Image: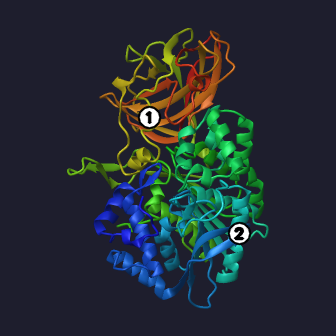
Amino acid sequence: MSNPQDDNEISAVTPAQVARLAEHGIYASATELDPDAVNLAQALVATLKGEADSALLTPELRQLTEQVQARATLGFPTIASHGVELSAFTIKLHGDEPRPVVIVPAGWTPLGWTIFAYAYLQLALRGYHVLAYTPRGIGLTFPLIGGGYHDAFFTSGGTVDVAGPKDRLDGSTVIDYAQQHLSPSKIAFLGESYGSGISQLVAAHDPDDRVDAVVAFSTWGNLATSLYDNGTRHLAAVEALVNFTGGPEERKFDADTREILADFRAGRNLDRVVAWGTERAPSAYTEETNDRDIPTFFSNTWHETLFPVNQVGEHFERLTVPKHLNLWIGDHAAPEGAGLSIPWSGPNLPVEEAFAWLDHHVLGASDGVPEWPAVNSQIMFTYRTETDPETGQNVITEPAVREPASSWTEVTTSTEDWFLTSVGSDSRDGGLAQEAETGWKREFTAGELTDATAVDAIIATGQAEWKGNPKTYATDKFDRQHLAVWTTAPLDATATGAARRVRGVPELTLSIRSSVASATLVACLFDVSADNTARIITHEPLTLTDLTPGEDHTATWRLQAAAYDVAPGHRLMLVVGSKDQLYSDALTDAGIDSSTTTVTSVDGVAAVLKLPLG
């Protein structure tokens, strides 16, 4: 990534670059922003600061900056807060008319507040003052020859508190600054990812209860279970985050946080890690949020790899405030990332609906928000696509279906039991049938990665899903030596002749026997078409410890929620393996290369997949 302080390295933004970002998203990987997205943000900020040596922006972006500059005064302050300096950006609209402010804590990104400069300009045109800031410790830090470091202008001082108590205090200090310098009529917080968690936490803890509304994109409810759930550590997500702060770990985190990270990686002192994560969980402060009656808007994805969907849904359901939850196809930040960063040829619904929420709750607009359903779910993968002959990639020609619901729990209206059986439609596999069968067993060698993975890459796989290109799996390549597989017969049409509507949280019960004292099970549920290719519906790992080798142990765990239509004639396939690149696994933790796992259905406890329907 180029040095964003050196505007000699900023090139002119072209319409083709903007179009490509709109089509493919702003992330090159989980730990890298697309270079064109970086360049666009740098070009916008350099222009706003008056430091651009030449015209860097497209006509549309140039017009946007000129419109805002004609209506407002821009500032680039640093805000002193509890021993550190926070880099900030302000837009103060002209005139004496009282205006609300939208405060935007930056996400977990090396570009700090600059990456969403486009969104701040859009908010200003809607009638808001804006105050964006980089949370402490976040932002690019450059090593100096001979030792030491130099921070980019948008980098904030101190070390990353990971949405801890210091970040909550900083948020209140930023509100103080906004009140002093912008005199807002109301105060809203809007954040994506890291900024969304901070937004919820500041709203719940500000001593003077000054936050009037919150927008939380790609957020978490419970940070503890986002990192460690069902006995399994989400290692890849944490490593991606650690590598995306903008500098080396020893510079970005203090000794206490580095110790937490070391314990998490090693799988030790996990009670302490959970307590640390719970302190940073908005769900731990539901009572405070409810008492303050803070209108809160959530926007998340079904195949989220950083903050899985179940914990967000559970947090949402416990809130009694005015609230709304959008769930979209894709992974972390895919739906809103580009909409907050670049112009679109049409409305970016994830962002437009969030702005409408703010318009109603802080601007007082009569825009229909009170009539919205509490939950609106986009259904995988009901969009229509055409193949681009130049790229070979699908292009969405008709958006995916969205379904309203009055609450998170009412997404599911019934359940359907699929019992694991000895023989399926493929002679290599077990079956999924609607009558229970016990006494069978299926055995595999644990300890190997297989093609039955949740994603190819954090963010990137889900970003492709969002744009119409979900990952296709060749189920014939699933290595049955290292997996157990169960499949239904081709599914009949439902009573209405339509697809089978998976809606909610599947639950899996089975018995296992391990040759060693611990085992990890990674369950993946697939939709398999007639040509044996598949798309993933959902997944979830489970790690069991303190097993008695050779003895049966029955376990039940919940997979992540899904909204997915399985077409008539397709089959459901349940795959259980021992390893996925996203997660810790019991054998690696124990220093064991391989073991034998036997899945069975013991007398009296049928192995069953409970499939939620809606």
The disc placed on residue 495 is 1
Tell me: 127 left or right of 230: left
Q: Position of residue 348 (x, y in %)?
A: 43, 63
Q: Residue furthest front?
A: 146
For mark 2, give the secondary structure. Answer: strand
Identity of the residue drawn at 34% across and 65% down? 18
Residue tagged 2: 81
The disc placed on residue 605 is none
In this view, the residue in front, 149 or 179, is 149
Q: Residues within 10 Å of mark 1 (few under 14, many from 20)?
A: few
Asked if disc 1 and disc 2 are in contact, CB closer than 8 Å, the reply is: no
Q: Position of residue 41 (x, y in %)?
A: 43, 68
Tell me: 118 left or right of 518: left
Q: Position of residue 549 (x, y in %)?
A: 64, 11
Locate the N terminus by quadrant: bottom left
Q: Position of residue 490 (x, y in %)?
A: 38, 26
Tell me: 46 left or right of 170: left
User: Quick check: 607 above or below 563?
Assistant: above
Q: Residues within 10 Å of mark 2 (few under 14, many from 20)?
A: some
